[in-house]
């Protein structure tokens, strides 16, 4: 699986992005799989790259109690999902939305100066900052976050 993605045609020219921390998360993803008990499930795809993430979460209204992500795709998308789960697990939904905004800002998307917090708040996910130089790759890094925001919205609507 790793070899397939490392040497795949879609990986050309971005080897320098594959920092050790990204590869660590790709090879040994955190919170991988499907929760036995969950109240929201969302799926996100990035057709440009073939990335897919399937996210299950248990949200009690104001707090994300637990999360698992399964899926497949390039190292950036899968590592980003792993890094994200570490950051958001057991966090209040409001804090997660701030982290998502901060992550987007880091990648040059939604650059609002009013977003509080520093990049240090993003933990291992700061390793993905270099991705902003590669517009096609930004969608890979954002995929898990967009899928999570969708899950939180669906959960909020469900009440
Ligand atoms: Zn990708």
Image (cartoon, helix red, strand yellow):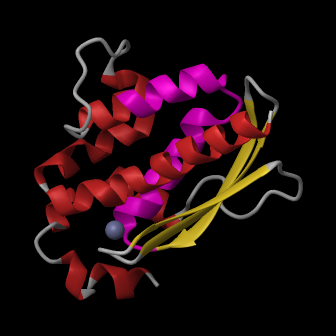
Query: Would you identify the image quadrant in which residue 42 lies?
Result: bottom right
Whole-percent x, y for residue 29 in the image? 56, 59
Q: Is residue 7 left or right of residue 102?
A: left
Ligand 1's quadrant is bottom left
- Does the image show residue 140? yes
Quarter of the rendering containing residue 116: top left
Residue 18 can be seen in this image: no
Q: Which residues are magenta?
A: 73-101
For residue 79: magenta?
Answer: yes
* Residue occupying the far front of the picture: 157
Residue lying furthest right: 37
**Viewed as shown, does residue 103 lie left or right of 95?**
left
Side of 68 relative to 148 (left or right): right
Of 85 and 155, the residue lying toward us: 155
- Majority SS type along the magenta span: helix
Q: Nearer the viewer, residue 70 or 46?
A: 46
Q: Position of residue 47 (x, y in %)?
A: 37, 75
132 w.r.t. 64: above or below: below
Judge whether residue 130 is colored magenta.
no
Q: Position of residue 45 (x, y in %)?
A: 46, 68
Relative to 28, residue 108 above or below: above
Q: Residue at x 39, y 41 (%)?
A: 125
Residue name at image x 80 percent, y 33 percent: 159
Name the residue rendered at 51%, 43% in the picture.
84
Q: On the rendered structure, is 60 left or right of 143?
A: right
**Residue 112 figure quarter:** top left
Q: Position of residue 51 (x, y in %)?
A: 42, 72
């Amino acid at each position: 699986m790793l070899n397939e993605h490392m040497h795949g045609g879609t990986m050309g020219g971005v080897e320098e992005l594959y920092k050790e921390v990204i590869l660590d998360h790709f090879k040994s993803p955190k919170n991988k799989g499907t929760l036995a008990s969950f109240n929201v499930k969302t799926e996100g795809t990035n057709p440009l790259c073939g990335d897919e993430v399937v996210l299950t979460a248990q949200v009690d209204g104001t707090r994300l109690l637990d999360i698992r992500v399964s899926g497949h795709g390039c190292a950036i998308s899968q590592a980003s999902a792993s890094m994200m789960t570490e950051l958001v697990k057991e966090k209040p939904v409001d804090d997660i939305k701030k982290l998502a905004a901060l992550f987007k800002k880091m990648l040059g998307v939604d650059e609002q100066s009013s977003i509080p917090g520093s990049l240090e708040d993003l933990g291992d996910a700061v390793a993905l900052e270099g991705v902003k130089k590669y517009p096609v790759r930004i969608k890979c890094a954002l995929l898990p976050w967009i899928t999570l925001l969708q899950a939180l919205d669906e959960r909020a609507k469900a009440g």
